[in-house]
Image (spheres, rainbow, N blue to C red):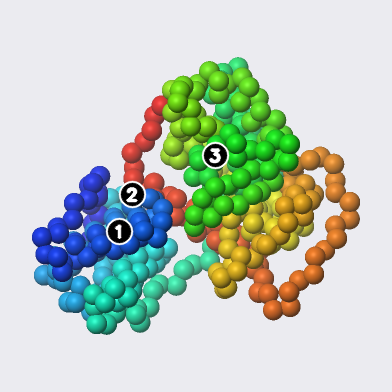
Amino acid sequence: MAPRGDNQPSKIVWDTKDPHGMGALVLRYFESLLIKAFSKQTIQSRNCTLHSFTVWLEARGITQPREVTEPILESYQRYLIRYRKPNEKPLTISTIHNRMTSIRALFRWMMKSRLLLSNPAADLELPRMDKRLPRQILSTQEAETILQIPDLNKPQGIRDRAILETLYATGIRRMEVNNLKIHDVNMNRGTVMIRLGKGRKDRMIPIGERALAWIDKYLLEVRPTLVFEPDDGTLFLRLSGSPMGVKRVSEIVSAYVKLGGIKEGSCHMFRHTMATLMLEGGADIRYIQHMLGHSNLETTEVYTQVSMRKLKEVYDSTHPAAKLKPLETETKEPEKKDEKRMTAEELLSILAAEEQEEKEEDEENPGKEKKR
């Protein structure tokens, strides 16, 4: 019979009585991640994953890392395949892959820290990730329909329109729109600075004139009525004056998508849409990768070492939310002969995997934020 899922406690308490036991060593591992400046979200996710793994081991009488073998890890991977969540659905391949990757990283750290003589996860074969394309992509008309739904007679309507326009124009992640500060938006240059995006990397990207106009309207007419001192400069605020929170951003966007009667979806739908529309408009994938904040996984070098001027030209000529004036004939930059180029299908597959990660993150943390 397949195992059933249990809700994780809101705060995980590790057993640290044995300094050589799994609990104590996992906490030391988290300390090393903090020193390396891993994000809070990454550490929290690995905390849940490794706690579940440790509980599974303890149920089989295994409390010491040195007792873990490759067959035991393979047995745990089979357990995850049979696992059923409270809604009776199995874990996705990407979830299983991510959990086993976290476990493999833990044992790799133990080896480097000389806490183990051998690494039981060194030769562990992880499930192959499916390459799926995004299921939800808006046409230009569908996007425009959703953008026009917010009630502009209400303060939250103007704020929500600015959020929707920002997502559509830039394709940034919900976490990134939630973390935007006022000074990150440069009205004169038509750019947005994304600070500490995924992978803790900064990037500057262009943003369309219409989105800038709605942000400006929100800043002039709405935000001054919401903010209270001390003002930390967060761009988008709740009506209570506090920062939005990623789940609230998702809930707001999902509500407008549903009201539009088009498709079910949220912030990632606009991310998919931005990438697809620019691809269809003829943009080189390197520029779209820079917009999305993706790195070349084949080398340590970022694919998209492109100038902001050139990126702005490509953006203006390929994204419907940018300038209405078409760009003159584009001058192509020379390509490196040995550079491996990502295909459009691979790019969209990465976006689909990102969306699945967000859904699983929300399922593991089901608490909802109800204030506007």
- Tell us which disc is closer to us: 3 or 1: 1
143 horizontally vs 266: left or right: right
* Location of residue 16 in the rendering, given as x and y in whole percent from the top left corner: 14, 59
The kind of secondary structure element at disc 1 is helix
Q: Is residue 130 above or below residue 277?
A: below
Q: Amino acid at mark 1?
A: Glu
Q: Which residue is mark 2?
A: 364
User: CA gap, disc 2 to disc 3?
Assistant: 25 Å
Viewer-nearest residue: 87 or 337: 337
- Residue positioned 55% across, 20% down in the render: 224
User: CA gap, disc 2 to disc 1?
Assistant: 23 Å
Q: Amino acid at mark 2?
A: Glu
Labelled disc at residue 31: 1
Labelled disc at residue 180: 3
- Residue positioned 44% across, 72% down in the render: 128
Taking the image as drawn, is residue 344 in sight? Answer: yes
Q: Is residue 170 above or below residue 337?
A: above
Q: Which quadrant, please, contains the N terminus? A: bottom left
Q: Are marks 2 and 3 in contact (CB under 8 Å)?
A: no
* Location of residue 320 in the rendering, given as x and y in whole percent from the top left corner: 74, 43
235 horizontally vs 91: left or right: right
Pointer 2 local density, CA inside 10 Å: few below 14, some 14–19, many at least 20 = few
Q: Amino acid at mark 3?
A: Leu
Pointer 1 local density, CA inside 10 Å: few below 14, some 14–19, many at least 20 = some
